[in-house]
Amino acid sequence: MRARPSSVTALASAVTVAVALAGLVACAAPSDQAAPLSTRATVTSAASSSPPSGGPVITVPGLSSAAPTTPPATKTEAPASSSTPPPMQAAPTTTSSPDPAPTSEPATTSRPEPAPAPRRTTAAAPRPGPGPAAIGPVAGRVVVIDPGHNGANGAHPDIINALVDAGFGQTKPCNTTGTSTNDGYPEHALNWKVAGYLQAMLEAKGIRVVMTRDSDDGVGPCVNKRAAIGNAARADAVVSIHGDGDDASAHGFYVMTAEQDPAGATMASRSQNLAVDVRDGLVAAGLSPSDHLGSDGLWPRNDLAGLNLSVMPTVMIESGNMRNSADAALMSSAAGQQEIAQGLANGVLAYLGGG
């Protein structure tokens, strides 16, 4: 029979049409696919309600370089003089009720200028930090004067050569004989004379003066004891007086302070202020600052017990070079010694606010 093939043919045709229609439906699918992801970064507006949180703020500390330290000169010691200068009146080395130490900084940052010359400001020696703890009348303030060495030191080497604490882990001989001019005028006599003139000048202003020794024919005291006297007196200022024994070409004075801070930064700042005032006071009196050691008459030291052990405002003075002929002539004369004392008084009074 022929009807069966016709049915099969018709069925095959129907399947073919169905498959074609399915292919048309599948080709339309890409129009419904999602768009691809963009690679452009999203910029968030500053006005966005939810701004992104930033990372931590990093602060880079400032850098500083330490100034080179000039090695200290070696002081040439001289034997004690055979003649003893006349003794001078000195204040006792201890007091029963020393004035209290200053405990607060001044309310103002300006300080009176030293008389008679204005304060010198140099790049080498700027005035750091606050001024003295109080400004006003100087009467009743305490100043310790330390005349270096002593007249009989040379006759007692067993005492003066004994090692004592010099601060910051150092030790030093108890004391030394000091230096002298080329013609034999001893440093201990210079220091004692200048100290006597300075004592009289300060006491005339009502300042209470304490001396670390009461004659120029004794031994010591040791350098650590001298520092202790200033600390016990709770001094408003300590001035240690010396003469240098440097190379003959060196000329002029310099004012030394502790390179380290034995009583912290605030007290170190006060010592530096005292040094600048004393330097300026000596210049006003006619003396020349030295640049041979330190700079512009100022020299920080880290090897001196009198500075390392003091917890009060303290300076040490080399009032000139006793091996320089011009300095020696000034330092061994009464007129020169009074000139040095006047310069020291100028500086101390300016520092205390009474200059």
Image: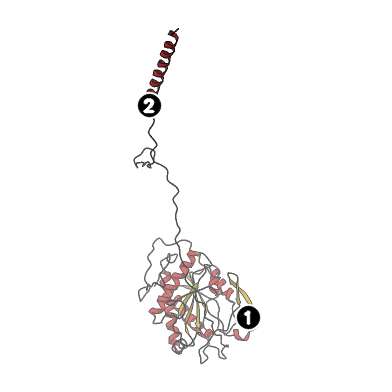
Is 95 left, or right, of 339 in this rendering?
A: right
Colouring rule applied to residues: secondary structure
Point 42% across, 11% down: residue: 6
**SS under mark 1:** loop
Q: Residue furthest bottom?
A: 183
**Residue type, label 1:** Asn
Is 134 left, or right, of 188 in this rendering?
A: left
**SS under mark 2:** helix
Q: Based on the displayed image, in which of its 4 quarters is residue 335 positioned?
A: bottom left
Residue beneath label 1, please?
Answer: 161
**Residue type, label 2:** Cys
Observer able to see residue 202: yes
Observer able to see residue 206: no
- Nearer-N-terminus badge (1/2): 2
Mark 1 vs mark 2, foreground winner is 2
User: Mark 1 Cα within 10 Å, few/some/many (few <14, many 20+)?
Assistant: some
Image label count: 2
Residue 27, disc? 2
Q: Nearer the viewer, residue 192 or 204?
A: 192
Where does residue 129 sit, x and y in percent of width and height? 43, 65
Where does residue 73 sit, x and y in percent of width and height? 52, 80
Point 49% across, 66% down: residue: 267
